[in-house]
Image: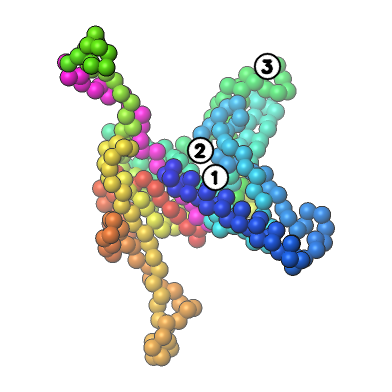
């Protein structure tokens, strides 16, 4: 997921840089239109790109980025992967609140206990991400305020919602020694057993349904789409640790359907879109699969790692 997150960020930076270069070239050639008013030709937007971690001192841990774009063409990365949330801290003593907006390209959500028999749902993970939390933060307005309640709400829905399931957990494992002397230490110390840090995989079953609603997490005063999404892609990790394993994926594709008139003419109608089918990918192998295979197979439920949804 880190690779995919960096890929989206790098792609965004490259597109933004190319856009700026093209705009500069047009200005040099004298082809650009004169601005009607100050600030109308170009808009500079300063946003905070979140990392799905909560930092009480900074409301949330993020890196700042200034994005420059024109008012008539949004970058594809902003057009699709642009989830904006508002993080608010309210003093539990005097009620003073402060907030800031953050931009996310994807969300990293928790996964339930692998030992439990119940299936973990995506909605449960989202509830944990957006639930209110008590923070140890000193109030800026009163002396008694030592804690604050943090709330998060969505203020802008993306066209593509990318979810990362936090399956890997940092654990300590005992690495056995071989009972021999360590040559690097001149034979003065024996190679004994020691603990090492391992990212172990949580194989809890996750239920991926075809439809997903994020409406409960959208702010009350926000005018946005209804927050309904459809599953269109899944990435699976087959393995036990983060340093080993194999990746497979399932993706949905649309098929064009010919209307009666176009069938008679031997063509395909652009107005009528098809049925949809799922395709399973494993290296060079691709096979058609059903939706039940994608969401109901226990192997896929225990190994799903990334899920991509499209706005309805």
Q: Which badge, 1 or 2, comes first in the chain's sequence?
A: 2
Q: Residue at x 62, y 39 (%)?
A: 64
Q: Which residue is mark 2?
A: 52
In the structure shown, which secondary structural element does the residue marked by tag 1 occupy? Answer: strand
Residue 182 in view (yes/no): yes
Residue 93 image point, x, y percent: 66, 22
State which mark lies toward you, 3 or 2.
2
Q: Residue at x 34, y 66 (%)?
A: 277
Secondary structure that dominates the magenta span: strand
Q: Which badge, 3 or 2, comes first in the chain's sequence?
A: 2
Q: Which residues are magenta?
A: 157-179
Is residue 129 placed above or below 304 in the rendered structure? above
In the structure shown, which secondary structural element does the residue marked by tag 3 occupy? Answer: loop
Q: Residue at x 62, y 42 (%)?
A: 65
Residue 71 image point, x, y percent: 70, 59
Q: Is disc 1 surrounded by few (<14), some (14 to 19) or many (20+) residues within 10 Å? A: many
Q: Which residue is mark 3?
A: 144
Front in this rendered view, residue 309 or 32: 32
Residue 153 in view (yes/no): no
Residue 104: which numbered mark, if any?
Answer: 1
Is residue 290 located in the magenta-colored stretch of the structure? Answer: no
Q: Which badge, 3 or 1, comes first in the chain's sequence?
A: 1
- Quarter location, residue 29: bottom right
Residue lying at the far right of the rendered structure: 37
């Amino acid at each position: 997921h880190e690779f995919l997150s960096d890929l989206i960020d790098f792609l965004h930076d490259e597109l933004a840089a190319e856009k700026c270069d093209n705009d500069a070239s047009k200005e040099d050639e004298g082809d650009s239109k004169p601005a009607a008013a100050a600030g109308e030709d170009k808009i500079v937007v300063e946003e905070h790109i979140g990392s799905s971690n909560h930092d009480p001192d900074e409301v949330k841990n993020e890196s700042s980025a200034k994005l420059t774009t024109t008012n008539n063409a949004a970058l594809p990365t902003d057009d699709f992967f642009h989830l904006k949330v508002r993080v608010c801290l309210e003093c539990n003593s005097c009620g003073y609140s402060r907030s800031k907006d953050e931009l996310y390209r994807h969300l990293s959500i928790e996964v339930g206990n692998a030992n439990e028999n119940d299936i973990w749902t995506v909605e449960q993970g989202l509830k944990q991400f957006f639930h209110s939390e008590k923070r140890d933060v000193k109030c800026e307005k009163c002396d008694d305020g030592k804690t604050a309640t943090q709330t998060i709400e969505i203020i802008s829905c993306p066209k593509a919602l990318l979810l990362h399931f936090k399956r890997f957990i940092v654990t300590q494992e005992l690495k056995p020694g071989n009972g021999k002397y360590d040559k690097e230490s001149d034979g003065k110390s024996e190679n004994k057993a020691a603990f090492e840090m391992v990212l172990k995989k949580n194989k809890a079953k996750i239920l991926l349904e075809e439809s997903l609603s994020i409406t409960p997490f959208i702010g009350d005063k926000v005018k946005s789409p209804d927050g309904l999404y459809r599953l269109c892609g899944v990435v699976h990790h087959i393995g036990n640790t983060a340093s080993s394993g194999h990746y497979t994926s399932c993706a949905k594709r649309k098929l064009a359907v010919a209307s009666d008139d176009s069938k008679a003419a031997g063509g395909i109608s652009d107005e009528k879109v098809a049925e949809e089918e799922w395709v399973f990918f494993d290296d060079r192998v691709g096979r058609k699969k059903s939706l039940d295979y994608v969401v109901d197979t226990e192997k896929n439920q225990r190994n799903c790692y990334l899920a991509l949804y499209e706005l309805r």
